Amino acid sequence: MSDPRTHINRRIILIALIPLLMGLGVVFRLFLLIFIDGPEIRSQAENLVIKEMRIPADRGNIYSSDQKLLATSMPVFDVLMDPISVTDDNWIAEIDALCRELSLVFGTKSAQAWKSYLTAAREDGNRYVPLAKNVSFTTLVRLKEMPVFNLGKYRGGLIAEQKNYRKMPLDKIAERTIGYDKQSAGAGLEGAFAGVLSGHDGVKMMQRIAQGNYKPLHDGFISQPRDGQDIVTTIDTRIQDITHHALLRAVEFYEADHGTAVVMEVKTGEVKAIANLGRNAKGFYYEKRNYAVWESTEPGSTFKLATILALLEDGRADTGTFVDTKDGKWEIYGQTVRDANVSSGAAGYGRISLAKAFAKSSNVGIAELVNKLYKNDPEVFVDRLYKFGLHKQLNTEIKGEGKPYIPHPSDPKWSGITLPWMAFGYETSFTPLQILTLFNAVANNGVVVKPYFVREIREHGRTIKRIEPTILNASLCSEATLNKTRALLEMVISEGTATNIKSDNYAMAGKTGTCRLEYWKRGGEVKYQASFAGYFPAENPKYSVIVVINSPNPQKGYYGSKVAAPVAKNIADNLYTEIPVILPSERVNPLASTTDFENLTTQLNQEKLPNFKGLPGYSVIALLENNGYKTSITGNGRVTAQYPEPGSRVRAGATVQLNLQ
C-alpha cells in the first residue's frame, strides 16, 4: 500500500512545475526578443516613434538691379500645444490666464472657448492641438512669454513648426517674371533658378506623438540646412513701376483683354522692366501670364522693319524706290490688301516712295513691292529673314518661350498670298520679346544681343557669378542698311503714323502695328492687336521698348498709334531726363539734305533746274512731281546725275531724268 504522503508530494511537485515551466518559457521568449528578434523590433519601434525629417533650407532672395527686394522668404509658424506635458498644478494655476492671452492675440475665440477647447483635448489625451497657422515670428515670441508656455517647450507644451512663406515686397509688380517654384511646376525666375535659390535641406530628429503627429526631439540638427543663394535681376524698380502703371492705364481705358510692355537696355540686352497684365472675370488686371515671353502672334506692321531690312540688304529696293499704293486697295488671288487710311474714307496714297510707304505703314505699297521683287524666287526673301536669325528662339532664362514662325516656300501651306502677306506681318508669328530684339539690334548698330533677366548670383552678399551680355549676331546687316533703316524709323515719328507721340525734348524712333486677330474667320466679333516697338533717344539709343495690347475695345480705339504708342511715349517721357540726348533740331537725318528745299522749290518756280546731285532720290522725285514735273528714274539711292543739267531753264510738265545710285 502506497504512502499517501508520496502521492501528495508528487502532486505538489507537479503543481510547482507548471509555473516553473511557464517561467522558463517566458525567459526563453525574452531571450529570443533580446538577442534574436530584438534588434529588428527595436529598429521598427524607433522608426515608429522617432524618425528623421527633412527641414527645408531658407530660399535665397531675389533682388532688383537697384538692390530692392523682389522676393524673399519670410519665416512663419504653425503653432500647436501638447497639453499633456503640463503638470496638473501648473494647469490649474495658469490655464485661465493663458486662455485670456490667446483670446487677445488671435481673436478667434473667447477666453472661455479656448479653455473648453484645450481642456477637452487634454482629457482626450490629444498631444497635438492646433492653435493657429502662419503665425509671424513676432507673434511666436509673444506666445512664448504667455502663462504656461513660458515654462519652456517640454513643461509648457508649446510646439512651433516653421515654414517659409515667399513674399514679394513690391506686391504684384513683375509678379509673372519673378514667378514661382512649386512641386508641380515652376515659372519665371523662381522656376528657372530653383536650383540656385533652393539651397540644401537639413535633417532633424522628430518624435512621434499622438494621432500620427511629430514634434522635434531636440533643438539641434543631424545636418544643418544650407540656405539658397541670392540672384540679382536686371529689373530696375523705378522703370518697372513706370512701365507697369503706363500699361495699366492703357489696358483699363481701352478695356483690353491683356497687354505687355518691355523696356530693354540697348547695349547689353538687360530687361529693365517687363509688365504683363491680363483681365480677370471681374474686369480687374493682374499679372496673369508672361505674354512678352510666351505669347506668339502675328505681329502686324512692326514686322515691316524686317521686310525693309531684307529689301535694302538684298539690294532689291532703296528708300527712294517708288511704289504704287493705288487707291489703298490691292487685289491678289481673290484677296484684298488694304491700307489703314482707306477705312477713314481716304483714297490711298497713290504713287509714293518706299520711305513714305514705310512711314505711313502702307500695307499695299510694301506687299505689292515685295511680291513684285521676290515672287519668282520667294526663298531669297525668306532666307534673308533666316539670316537675320528671326526663326530662332531667344532661349532666355524664363521658360515657356513661344516659337517664332516664318513660312517657307517648301511648306505645304505656302500659297500665292503668303509672300505679300508676310511683307506686312501676317502669316508669321513672334513673341513681343522676339520682335523687340530685332528693333534693339537696329538701335545697337546691328549687334543682336540676347535679352536677359539676371545679372548676378550672390552668396552671403558676395558675388560668386556675374552674367555677361550674350551676342547672338555681331552684324545684323550692313552699315548702309542700318543708317537708312534708322532714318525710316525716325520718319514714322516725325511724319508718319506716330506723329502723336513726337516730342520737342528728345527724338524717338519706332514703328506702329495694327493686326486683325483671326482675320480668316467670318462673322463674330472683330478683334485687333495694337503694338508699338522702338527705341530712344534716336541718337545713341539707351533703351528699346515694345508695347503690345491685345483685343482693345474697338469702339475706343485699336490702332497701334493710338493705343500702344502713347504707352511707349509715357515711359520715354519719364526716362529721357536721365539720358544725354541730341534734340531733333540738332541732328542730321540720313534721308534729308542740308540743302534748303524751300530754296529748291523757289528755283523750280522760276523755271530754273536746281542741282540735285547727292540728294536722296525719293525726296527729289517728290519735289519735282509736287511742282508739276515728270521724272524718269534709273537705279536706287541718291542722285548721281541729272538731265537737263543744273541751271537749265525747264518749265513745269517737262521730264527730268535722274540717275540714282
Image (cartoon, rainbow, N blue to C red):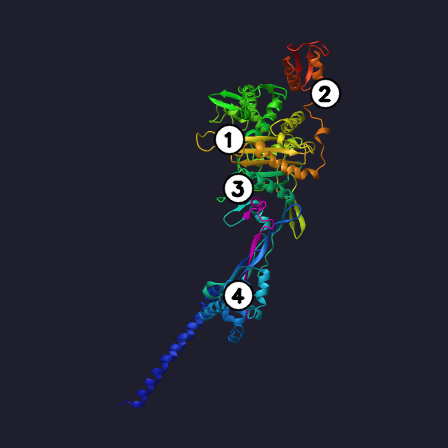
Name the mark nearer the viewer: 3 or 4. Answer: 4
Q: Amino acid at mark 3?
A: Gly
Q: CA distance from mark 2 to mark 4?
A: 85 Å
Front in this rendered view, residue 82 or 261: 261
Q: Which residue is mark 2?
A: 596
Residue 88 against residue 635 in the figure, above or below: below
Residue 205 against residue 183 in the figure, above or below: below
User: Where residue 268 sits: x, y (%)?
Assistant: 66, 38
Does any portion of residue 613 appear in the rendered image?
no
Q: Which residue is mark 4?
A: 103
Q: Earlier in the sequence, mark 3 or mark 2?
A: 3
Indicate yes or no whether the magenta region holds residue 395.
Answer: no
User: Where residue 55 sits: x, y (%)?
Assistant: 55, 58
Residue 599 against residue 527 in the figure, above or below: above
* Magenta-drawn segment: 154-180
Q: CA distance from mark 3 to mark 2?
A: 50 Å
Q: Which residue is mark 1?
A: 516
State if disc 2 and disc 3 touch (CB < 8 Å). no
Q: Which residue is mark 3?
A: 278
State if disc 4 and disc 2 touch (CB < 8 Å). no
Q: Earlier in the sequence, mark 1 or mark 2?
A: 1
Q: Earlier in the sequence, mark 1 or mark 4?
A: 4
